[in-house]
Amino acid sequence: MQYCKKPVIVDAVRITAADYNGHSFDGSPFSEMPDWLEKALQNGTIKISNARCTDYAEWAIDTLEGTMIAGPDDYIIQGVKGELYFCKPDIFAMTYTPLEFGE
């Protein structure tokens, strides 16, 4: 049997490739900073660490399935129940469509 995913609206933010020196960023690390993302950074649901092989930060996200590591170009998503997870850009593009203003 096949199933079709129900259409749901989620909030998502793309991680940009801002340089990170362990203390501060050269540029903005996110495409935008919504309240839910700021809250997750403040309460430790999302933690910043130095990436292993680049000058960029890694983002450790506490998800329902455990801690997942996101990096530049990945999306951080807030699901329908407020849960957080990340998605690679190619999967994000196949799964989600941007809403036009007012939808």
Image (tube, rainbow, N blue to C red):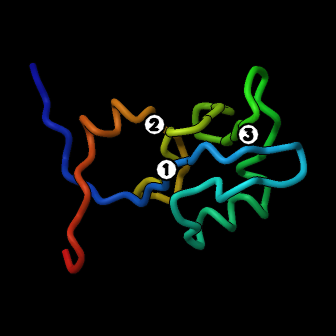
Residue under pointer 2: 87
Q: Is 1 above or below relative to 83?
A: above
Which residue is painted at 66% across and 47% down in the image? 18
Q: Say whether disc 1 or disc 3 marks the residue closer to the N-terminus.
A: 1
- Name the residue type under label 2: Cys
Residue under pointer 1: 14
Most distant residue in the bottom direction: 102
Q: Is residue 92 left or right of residue 27?
A: left
Question: Which residue is at the front of the view, 89 or 25?
Answer: 25
- Say few, some or many: other residues with alpha carbon within 10 Å of mark 3 (under 14 / 14 to 19 / 20 or more): many
Q: Say whether disc 2 or disc 3 marks the residue closer to the N-terminus.
A: 3
- Looking at the rendered structure, the secondary structure element under dot 1 is strand
CA distance separating discs 2 and 1: 9 Å
Q: Is residue 6 left or right of residue 84?
A: left
Query: x, y (%) of residue 51?
Result: 76, 30
Residue under pointer 3: 57
